[in-house]
Image: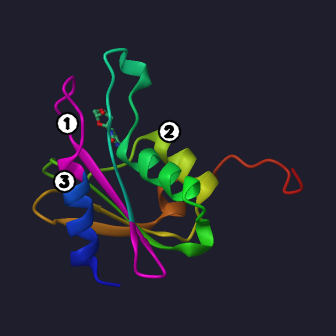
Amino acid sequence: MNVDSLLDMALTARFHAYAPYSKFKVGCAILLKNGQFVTGCNIENKSYGLSICAERNAVFKLISMGYTKNDVEAVCVVGDLKEPIMPCGACREVLMELLSPDTKIILSNLERNYIELNLNDLLPYAFKINEEL
Ligand code: THU
């Protein structure tokens, strides 16, 4: 996996963020096993609670395009912070629902100072319901 090109895609996605209220732009890129990318950015709303984070935007796009967790190689998130960005709790839950716990997650700032971990590190002891449901 080429981390630089994945970071490039997340940084480009961030460019499209609509964040007039927080002024905090976030980009996310999901690398597929077929080499393609699905990207997302945060999109805010004047009714603040309707805003969507970059990670959820990207993973909802992934599913709506017909892909599944089995198609995903890695996820990258970027934001303008001194440290690598950390996804919010809501995004951790949604990513855990739709991706595999061992999915590689790259978290970065704009200087490409990144850390790599997996989804299970971000949401250990995740909420589960019976498998047959
Ligand atoms: N945001 C994301 O896009 N991802 C996160 O993981 C945390 C927060 C967005 C939501 C809001 O538009 C802005 O960043 C400030 O919270």
Which residue is tagged 1? 24
Which of the two discs, 1 and 3, labels the residue nearer the N terminus? 1
The residue drawn where x is 61% and y is 56% is 98
The residue drawn where x is 46% and y is 46% is 56
Where does the image place residue 16, in percent across and percent down from the top left?
A: 22, 46
Residue, far front? 65
Left or right: 39 with respect to 133? left
Which residue is tagged 3? 83
Where, by quadrant of the figure, is residue 25 drawn?
A: top left
Residue 29 in the magenta stretch? The answer is: yes
Question: Ligand 1, what quadrant?
Answer: top left
Q: Quadrant of the N terminus?
A: bottom left
Marks 1 and 3, how far apart at CA: 14 Å
Q: Tag 1: residue type?
A: Phe
Secondary structure state at the residue bearing disc 2: helix
Can residue 108 be seen at all in this image of the molecule? no
Where, by quadrant of the figure, is residue 84 drawn?
A: bottom left
Which residue is tagged 2? 90
Magenta segment: 14-37
Which of the two discs, 2 and 3, labels the residue nearer the N terminus? 3
Q: Tag 2: residue type?
A: Ala
For the residues carrying marks 1 and 3, which lies nearer the camera in this image? 1
Q: Residues within 10 Å of mark 3 (few under 14, many from 20)?
A: some
Which of the two discs, 2 and 1, labels the residue nearer the N terminus? 1
Where, by quadrant of the figure, is residue 117 drawn?
A: bottom left
